[in-house]
Amino acid sequence: MAVELSEQEMRQALFGPSKQAQSEPSVTTSPPASQPEVELKSRPPSRPASKPLSTKLRVTLHVTREFEGKVEVLVVDANTLSTLTAEQEAKAEAKKRKFRYFDVISVLPI
């Protein structure tokens, strides 16, 4: 049961009829040979310039050396896009500075 389908028929079977095929029939015409073909290039609509993604995250921690002791604010900048990695780097920095208790307050791109 082999059925030979053209490429257009296969596309229509897989994806349904295209919007272009529904709105206008496909008629191909060739320009007269005596007139040169002139192409008008139109610009795509301009978009507002977007900011490049930041490669740094700023992690803010509240840290203490003793339980319910004096709370200090520790700010660490991490060179990553992953918030999880940034938190881990900030906690490692807090441990390096001999803080035992820490609480992550925020992770923001800078």
Image (cartoon, grey):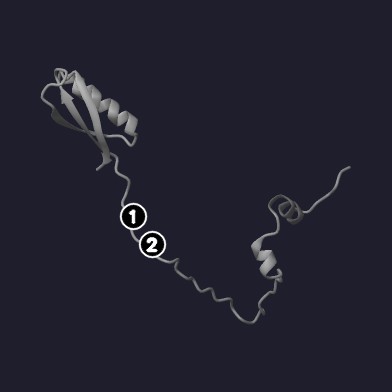
- Of residues 35 and 40, the one drawn nearer to the viewer in this rendering: 40
Residue with the most extreme bottom position: 34
Q: Quadrant of the C terminus?
A: top left
Q: How many marks?
A: 2
Query: Which residue is drawn at the image coordinates 59% and 78% (left, top)?
Result: 36
Secondary structure, mark 2, is loop
**What's the residue at 70%, 59% (across, down)?**
17
Residue closest to the eye, 66 or 21: 66
Location of residue 35 in the rendering, given as x and y in whole percent from the top left corner: 61, 81
Q: In which quarter of the image is residue 19?
A: bottom right
Which x, y percent locates residue 86?
29, 31
Residue at numbered disc 1? 50
Left or right, residue 59 beside residue 35:
left
Q: In terms of image quadrants, where is residue 32?
A: bottom right
Residue at 67% x, 69% y: name it: 23
Q: Residues within 10 Å of mark 2 (few under 14, many from 20)?
A: few
Picture disc at residue 35: none
* In the image, farthest residue toward the right: 1
Quarter in which the N terminus is drawn: top right
Q: Which residue lies furthest to the left in this view?
A: 70
Q: Does the residue at mark 2 contact the one at mark 1 (Cβ under 8 Å)?
A: yes
Residue 11 in picture, x, y percent from top left: 71, 53
Name the kind of residue labelled 2 in the image.
Arg
- The quadrant where residue 99 appears: top left
Can you say whether 42 is above or below 2 in the image? Answer: below
Question: Label 2 belongs to which residue?
Answer: 47
Q: What element carries label 1?
A: loop
Q: Residues within 10 Å of mark 1 (few under 14, many from 20)?
A: few
Q: Which amino acid does label 1 sit on?
A: Ser
